[in-house]
Amino acid sequence: MKRVMLDSRAQRGFTLVELMVAMVAGLFVSMAVFTLAKHASAFAMRQSRVADATLQSVIGFERMKADIARAGFLSTPNINRDPSVCRDGLDDPGYPAWLKRIAGVRIEAASDPAPGSAANGLSPKSLVLAGSYDAFDQFVARTVTQDASPKVVLSRTSLGMANIGYEPLTGAAALARVFKAGRALRIADDGGGVQFARITGVTGGETPTILLAEAPGVQFRSSSLVRCGVRGHGNDFVNPVTFIRYDIRSLRDSNPELAKMYLGGPSYEATRRELVREEIDVDGTADATTLELIAEYVVNLDFSLLVAENASGPLERISGADLANYAGNVDGLAGNGPQMIRAVHAWLSVRSQEADRPSALPFPTTTPGPNLLRISVNALDPTQPPFARVRTLQSTIPLANQSRTTWR
């Protein structure tokens, strides 16, 4: 039996030096792959957050557009100029403040814009809308009385009651949701007159009733010679009127859950602002239970208006300081006012969470909205880095409920 002798060189393995070189080379390759994967993952997450913020802003913007389109529905374009409004009591000191300012659209300064907004050429606004937002119908008033306090007894057989799902045994909650305490009640009489009162509560059962505040009370028609006022015997219709406000503010102190958004992260996270939606009662007090987060990292909310300056001429665009003449506290001055608004052009600008750009892009402002692409989030100097990317949504929303308002 022969023994096969193998060449000693064929039996050699890796030397220690070769093994160390291979391990070091593999380590460098692994580090390069890990670094590349890390940066790719971070980039993907950053773009995902930008996309999420953009998507959220689009959804919130669509919500605001829908609310604007419904402004003035079963309400009034301007209570101070509307010839159908029974004016008795409007100058009464007991008349709730926001009943005196009912208008389809009102535009005011934002309550808490981000630091540096002015330095970045921005003047964020808040938007107040009034209309029937929780009911699509008018409700038949079976009786209207004013004994110790005014009250309206509704007809259970009206379409409005059917649409809110009212039942004598279980419908009180549905009634309270629509005719919520603190909202305004619009009362339309059979003579074409309209008046507004404050809702204080409801009762259910077989005689669903809306309870009203003593001031401003209800104006009754004393005789056939008086045009304005209710008769209270089934000839009148009622519906709720809700004030909705869109505003820019910090939510750091609003509640513990929302405050968590401001924890951690870079220092410029503390300067973030959000767009919120809330309901306001007739005294001007916000209902904290209605607060909704509409969009995050908002840097601007602004508007221009298309108004009917001339009944026979084209619509004119109003913007900047002139907004106050048509959507501000004009108190019924002749020649202008919110009743003349036919469309609202709105734009909403949101920034990315990360400030990942070293410089601004010097694009000029365009009409009707800004061409803002980057904004500084430097709390100390809002003209210096870092800069965040900005996305702006714009749309023109017609006001169908004010399209035929001819009175000035």
Image: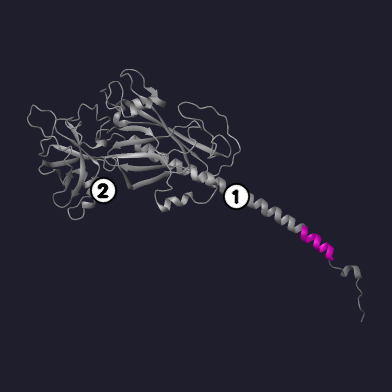
- Give the vertical position of 236 relative to 314 (above or below): below
Disc number for residue 363 = none
Tell me, yes or no, whether the highlighted magenta stretch contains residue 21. yes
- Helix or strand or loop: what does disc 1 sit on? helix
- Could you tell me the amino acid type at mark 1? Ala
Amino acid under disc 2: Arg
Q: Quadrant of residue 141?
A: top left
Q: Read off the residue under disc 2.
A: 177
Q: Which residues are magenta?
A: 15-24
Q: Nearer the viewer, residue 253 or 320?
A: 253
Residue 74 seen anywhere in this rendered image of the structure: no
- Residue 42 circle label: 1
Labels 2 and 1: the sequence-earlier one: 1
Q: Is residue 311 magenta?
A: no
Q: Secondary structure at mark 2?
A: helix
> Is 339 rendered above or below residue 354?
above
Residue 184 visible in the current orientation: yes
- Count every numbered label the image shows and give the total: 2
Q: Categorize mark 2 by other alpha carbons within 10 Å: few (<14), some (14-19), many (20+).
A: some
Residue at image point 29% right, 41% down: 133
Q: Is residue 277 left or right of residue 392?
A: left
Residue 70 position, x and y percent, is 32, 36
